[in-house]
């Protein structure tokens, strides 16, 4: 990305554009420096936002792995467990002669 001090504004006059490109205008030098500082800060902010985004993304993935996948597994295991448990209870009740 080019610094803002080097950008040519299309609606400007040719002389003003030429002076601006070569930083001959005194006020333009200050503005150019300030815009360069702002651009640097924006680039750092963009990097931080990308880092935070990746942290949130991996947190969401970890949450899915830790919470959702065990619930899906439980949906398959729980009926089998209940069937085994109820058959064990019925075998115990048949042995003891009691009914539940």
Image: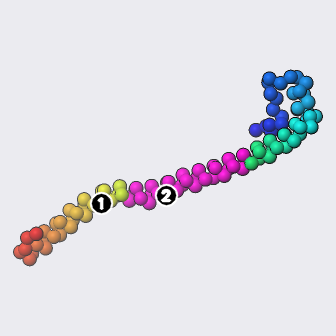
In the figure, is residue 35 to the left or right of 64? right
- The reply to whether the magenta stretch includes residue 64 is yes
Q: Is residue 96 above or below residue 10?
A: below
Residue that label 2 marks:
62
What numbered label is drawn on residue 11?
Answer: none
Residue 87 at least partly seen: yes
Q: Earlier in the sequence, mark 1 or mark 2?
A: 2
In the figure, is residue 73 to the left or right of 4? left
Q: Is residue 68 above or below residue 1?
A: below
Residue that label 1 marks:
77
Tell me which segment is drawn in magenta. 42-70
Nearer the observer, 26 or 99: 26
Nearer the observer, 18 or 84: 18
Q: Is residue 88 above or below residue 62?
A: below
**Residue at position x 83%, y 24% from top?**
12
Q: Tag 2, which secondary structure?
A: helix
Question: Residue 66: which quarter of the image?
Answer: bottom left
**Residue at position x 92%, y 37% from top?**
26
């Amino acid at each position: 990305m080019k610094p803002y001090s080097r950008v040519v504004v299309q609606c400007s006059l040719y002389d003003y554009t030429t002076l601006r490109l070569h930083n001959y205008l005194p006020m333009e030098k200050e503005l150019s420096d300030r815009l360069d500082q702002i651009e640097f800060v924006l680039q750092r902010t963009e990097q931080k936002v990308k880092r935070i985004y990746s942290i949130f993304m991996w947190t969401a993935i970890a949450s899915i792995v830790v919470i959702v996948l065990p619930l899906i597994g439980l949906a398959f295991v729980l009926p089998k467990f209940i069937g085994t448990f109820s058959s064990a209870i019925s075998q115990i009740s048949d042995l003891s002669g009691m009914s539940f």
